[in-house]
């Protein structure tokens, strides 16, 4: 596995969220994704807090909630 600095890990996390949509797995946590990437969870979380004002789990939760809202609106259905 390639050793990445925190900035590279931050970018990879962004790709995994935006392009690969890993947040669609409701059981997946920020810790899990950090383990996949070989990332220092604390360093990455600190960088995210500085850049985005949120932590990894909260960001993934926001993406999940956004997807549910999108589906509710698009299909006019009641999703839990």
Image (cartoon, rainbow, N blue to C red):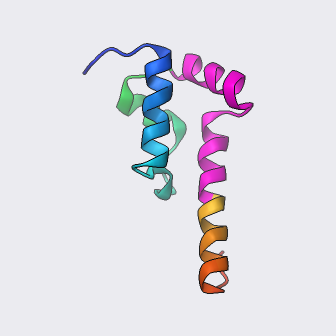
Q: Residue 7: within the magenta?
A: no
Q: Nearer the viewer, residue 70 or 30?
A: 70
Residue 70 appears anywhere in the view: yes
The correct choice, above or below, for 42 with respect to 58 in the image is above
The spot of residue 17 in percent (x, y) is 49, 45
Number of marks present in the image shown: 0
The correct choice, above or below, for 43 with respect to 58 in the image is above
Q: Quadrant of the N terminus?
A: top left
The spot of residue 40 in percent (x, y) is 48, 18
The residue segment tinted magenta is 41-64
The correct choice, above or below, for 34 with respect to 2 in the image is below
The spot of residue 67 in percent (x, y) is 59, 64
Residue 32 appears anywhere in the view: no
Residue under the image location 55 percent in, 22 percent down: 44
Q: Dominant secondary structure of the magenta stretch?
A: helix
Residue 80, quarter of picture: bottom right
Q: Residue 58: within the magenta?
A: yes
């Amino acid at each position: 596995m390639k050793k990445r600095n925190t900035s590279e890990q931050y970018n990879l996390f962004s790709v995994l969220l935006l392009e690969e949509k890993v947040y669609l797995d409701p059981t997946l946590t920020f810790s899990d994704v950090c383990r996949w990437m070989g990332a220092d969870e604390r360093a990455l979380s600190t960088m995210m807090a500085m850049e985005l004002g949120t932590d990894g789990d909260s960001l993934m939760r926001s993406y999940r909630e956004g997807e549910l809202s999108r589906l509710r609106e698009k299909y006019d259905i009641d999703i839990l």
